[in-house]
């Protein structure tokens, strides 16, 4: 009974407008009848019949309302085809429910995929972080600490940490981008300075040729370019790394190169390729992160390589963006 009483209150609240109109109509009828001094029997019929018909229809409507509420309380997405209201409005409601469920499933799958990728990344990242930490611990135990070796291991730790943080931040970059005009060559000089110890340890030469003024986000572009320089240093044993600015950015090295069958998959999440597996120093996320960042900044990236002859990475702006070239 309490449930019926609650439904009755809801039913009445939804039809307040109808009750107001009924009162106004009955009041006008009563006023007209009284002004004409009609017989009381006629008055009762003229006043009471519309009220009786209205009440009958309200009772029928309330019964349908209770039945509909009962059906809806047992309707699920599995038996939505048995939705009790088969009118056009009912069909519209079914379509809305289907769309909402589809959107919910898509969001859930996206979140589940992100959680899985993050879990896989965290496991791999934890393993990779242990390598430089173990190296530092060994140096301490054997009393073979040198400034250059410590700097090298700290750079590895910093790079792995930046990869993880950048990956997490990139999921929420809608309000994080800050566009300004700057020279990309200045960014590259700062990155090369950061990796100076690595270049010195491997006796690698580095050249920066030209300059290029663009309008973009310095912070995120720096993250992308640093991953490319990190790979160039990591996989180059002898020779040089050259960065050329013209109508694009070309970063070439004289490293070990990349297998032809690995090149199409270099930007896939978690793909390390033959070089990454052989060196066991790759998270498989650096180039994936780089590709994602550059795409959001409206850049395109392409890689060409030959085994034992080095790799060339070309970064160019999409045709929809403008840049100012400084020669």
Image: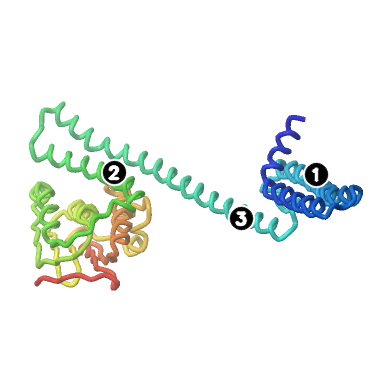
Distance (Cα) linking label 2 and label 1: 59 Å
Say whether marks 2 and 1 touch (CB < 8 Å).
Answer: no
Name the disc covering residue 206, or none: none
- Residue for badge 3: 96
Which residue in the rendered view is the most extreme toward the top?
141
In this view, the residue in front, 140 or 89, is 89
Residue depth check, mark 2 versus mark 1: number of the one nearer the observer: 1
x and y, in percent, of residue 58 in the image: 79, 47
Could you tell whether 162 is left or right of 107 in the image? left
Q: Badge 1: few (under 14), some or many (20 or more) residues near its Cα, within 10 Å?
A: few
- Vertically, is 118 above or below 140? below
Structural crowding at the residue carrying mark 3, measured as other residues with C-alpha within 10 Å and reported as few (<14), some (14–19) or many (≥20) = few
Q: Secondary structure at mark 3?
A: helix
Expressed as whole percent of the image width and height from the top left, the position of residue 173 reads: 32, 52
**1 or 3: tag closer to the N-terminus:** 1
Which residue is at the far right? 41
132 or 249: nearer the viewer: 249
Q: Is residue 82 visible?
A: no
Q: CA distance from mark 2 to mark 3?
A: 38 Å
Q: Percent x, y for residue 263? A: 33, 62
**Quadrant position of residue 242:** bottom left
Rendered view: 15 above or below 91: above
The answer to whether residue 23 shows anywhere in this view is yes
Reading the image, the residue beneath label 1 is 63
- Residue 247 figure quarter: bottom left
Q: Nearer the viewer, residue 152 or 165?
A: 165
| Residue located at (74% from left, 30% from top) | 2
Residue 30 placement, left or right of 289: right
Q: Which residue is mark 2?
A: 165
Give the quadrant of the C terminus: bottom left
């Amino acid at each position: 009974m309490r449930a019926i009483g609650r439904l009755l209150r809801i039913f009445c609240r939804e039809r307040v407008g109808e009750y107001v109109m009924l009162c106004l109509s009955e009041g006008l009828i009563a006023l007209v009848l009284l002004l004409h001094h009609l017989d009381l029997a006629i008055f009762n019929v003229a006043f009471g019949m519309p009220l009786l018909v209205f009440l009958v229809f309200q009772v029928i409507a309330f019964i349908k309302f209770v039945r509909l509420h009962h059906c809806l309380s047992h309707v699920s997405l599995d038996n939505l085809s048995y939705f009790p209201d088969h009118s056009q409005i009912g069909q519209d409601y079914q379509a809305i429910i289907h769309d909402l469920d589809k959107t919910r499933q898509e969001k859930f799958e996206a979140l589940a995929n992100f959680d899985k990728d993050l879990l896989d990344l965290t496991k791999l990242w934890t393993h990779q972080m242990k390598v430089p930490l173990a190296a530092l611990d060994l140096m301490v135990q054997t009393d073979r600490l040198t400034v250059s070796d410590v700097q090298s291991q700290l750079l590895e730790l910093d790079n792995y940490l930046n990869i993880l943080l950048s990956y997490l931040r990139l999921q929420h970059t809608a309000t994080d981008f800050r566009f300004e005009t700057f020279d990309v060559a200045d960014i590259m000089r700062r990155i090369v300075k950061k990796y100076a110890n690595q270049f010195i340890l491997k006796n690698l030469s580095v050249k920066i040729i030209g300059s290029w003024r663009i309008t973009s986000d310095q912070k995120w572009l720096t993250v992308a370019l640093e991953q490319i320089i990190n790979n160039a240093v990591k996989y180059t044993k002898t020779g040089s790394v050259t960065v050329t600015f013209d109508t694009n950015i070309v970063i070439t090295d004289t490293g070990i190169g990349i297998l032809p069958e690995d090149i199409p998959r270099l930007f896939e999440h978690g793909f390390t390729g033959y070089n990454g597996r052989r060196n066991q120093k790759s998270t498989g996320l650096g180039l994936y992160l780089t590709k994602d960042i550059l795409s959001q900044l409206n850049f395109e990236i392409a890689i060409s390589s030959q085994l034992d002859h080095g790799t060339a990475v070309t970064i160019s702006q999409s045709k929809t963006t403008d840049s100012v070239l400084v020669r």
